[in-house]
Image (tube, rainbow, N blue to C red):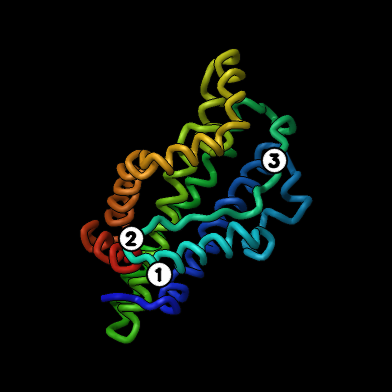
Amino acid sequence: MELNLIQKISVWIIPVIFAITLHEAAHGYVAKFFGDSTAWMLGRVTLNPFKHIDPVGTILVPLSILLLSKVLGGGFILFGWAKPVPVNFGALRNPKRDMLWVAIAGPAANLFMAILWALIIKLGISLGDSYTQPLALMGAAGIFINAVLMALNLLPLPPLDGGRIAVSLLPGPYAYRFAQIEPYGFYILLALMFIGWLGLILSPLLMLVIVITGAFSGLGHAEIATLIQIITN
């Protein structure tokens, strides 16, 4: 089974928008819970995706990847980004400790959404043939994009969420030195991508997310992996 470009866009657009925007909203919500109302005052603690969409990162980059994958053929890893939610870590009640929870909120939201998308696959199957294929493929896209965002953001590399988590957990002097990597984090990420290490690093966590979603939804992880292969080819 091979999807044309319009079918690919139809399958991916809703999962991508919600995966990226709810990730950011989760950061803002948890920051408010721990004392920083910056995102709340700017209207960023909301499920409205239009408050979070970045024209380049949320729309142009994912669409370009879909187009190139269709033209060039073969599998791909779809990713993107939303407008970062502003967090004033100094306003948190305990900045170093609470940074951990603010950072982990985004990946946790992605895991939660991946499980919900797995349940949507189950819903499509239960509704019958007219719904099984479109809902199953969209559910697989939801699982995959959320797994990718979760795995990518958990890399212990500032300014990614994993880097914030590491800074929170490391002792003071080591945390300060580690945080100095942040201006170079994006370039390190690009280097890992170009030398082919990024996929190798992310693959185990991607598979773990697929196994977890399968366990919660009652789907076999092999079944989810097959659906993901269809939408990424």
Q: What element carries label 3?
A: loop
User: Along the line of sight, which residue is nearer the eye, 63 or 126?
Assistant: 63
Q: What element carries label 1?
A: helix
What residue lies at 65% left-to-right and 48% top-to-bottom?
Answer: 84
Q: In which quarter of the image is residue 61?
A: bottom right
Marks 2/3: CA distance?
35 Å
The x, y position of residue 72, in whole percent, is 37, 65
Label 1 belongs to which residue? 71
| Label 2–label 1 contact, CB within 8 A | no
Mark 3 residue crowding within 10 angstroms, few (<14) / some (14–19) / many (20+):
some
* Amino acid type assigned to the residue bearing label 3 in the image: Val
In the rendered structure, which disc, 3 or 1, sits on the residue that comes first in sequence? Answer: 1
Taking 197 as reference, is 176 left or right?
right
The x, y position of residue 40, in whole percent, is 73, 50
What residue lies at 36% left-to-right and 39% top-to-bottom?
Answer: 197
Label 3 belongs to which residue? 87
Marks 3/1: CA distance?
39 Å
